[in-house]
Image (tube, rainbow, N blue to C red):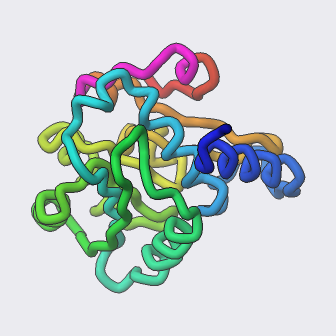
Amino acid sequence: MKPAWTIAVGLTLGAFALAPCARAEEPLEPQLALPILLRVLPYDRAFSTRGEGTFVVLIVAQPGAGGDRDALLRAAEALKVSSIQGRPLRFEAAEAHDVASLREAVRKAHAGAILVPARASNELLMALPVILDTEHTYTLAMDPSAVERKLALLSVSNREGRPQIWLNIESTRAMNASFDSAILRVARLIQ
């Protein structure tokens, strides 16, 4: 019997294949992108060494942009995914606008990953590589341009009607991550 989470990802990808797309490459809707992002993280060979207990994904937006953050949180809760590679999974919301406030939120939540909405402020995006480097926290972005600009580790987009994983190689080195070749073969690698 396949785990419910594998079935959910399969159904999500199946639904995505039927969805029309407006441009050749654009951010995915949260309900489509989140399962893919969560499925990719355990492909880091060091994932099991990155903390114990509950794996917290901190959904962060700048003050005043709670709508984007809350929409992501609702999409995450709708996934009904309760674990990631045997660890309990929890999503939390936070506000941050710079390195100091983001670091404080990450430490308070004991976050294993940070997820920022597609319309995150430049100040918040600029804080991501610092947090990745100092806190060794996965940085996920709903907008793949954050990976292209080398500000986030991982994203996923719509590329001609199919999901396209984006992976920042510099960030993987900074946090001593080593993604499996299965991901490296299908991802758009940003050097």
Q: Quadrant of residue 2?
A: top right
Q: Residue at x 35, y 71 (%)?
A: 61
Asked if 26 appears above or below 179 in the picture, the reply is below
Horizontal side of residue 183 vs 113, given as left or right: right
Q: Quadrant of residue 41?
A: top left
Kindly tell me whether residue 19 is visible in this rendering.
Answer: yes
Q: Residue at x 24, y 55 (%)?
A: 111
Q: Residue at x 58, y 44 (%)?
A: 36
Q: Position of residue 114 (x, y in %)?
A: 33, 54
In front here: 82 or 158? 82
Q: Position of residue 141 (x, y in %)?
A: 45, 52
Q: Which residues are magenta?
A: 174-184
Q: Position of residue 188 (x, y in %)?
A: 58, 28
Q: Quadrant of the C terminus?
A: top left
Kindly give the residue lying farthest to the top in the view shown.
181
Q: Is residue 100 magenta?
A: no
Asked if 1 appears above or below 75 in the picture, the reply is above
Kindly tell me whether residue 125 is visible in this rendering.
Answer: no
Asked if 153 appears above or below 101 in the picture, the reply is above
Asked if 75 appears above or below 161 in the picture, the reply is below
Q: How many marks?
A: 0
Q: Quadrant of the N terminus?
A: top right
In front here: 80 or 32? 80
Horizontal side of residue 54 vs 72, given as left or right: left
Q: Residue at x 48, y 27 (%)?
A: 190
Horizontal side of residue 33 vs 24, given as left or right: left
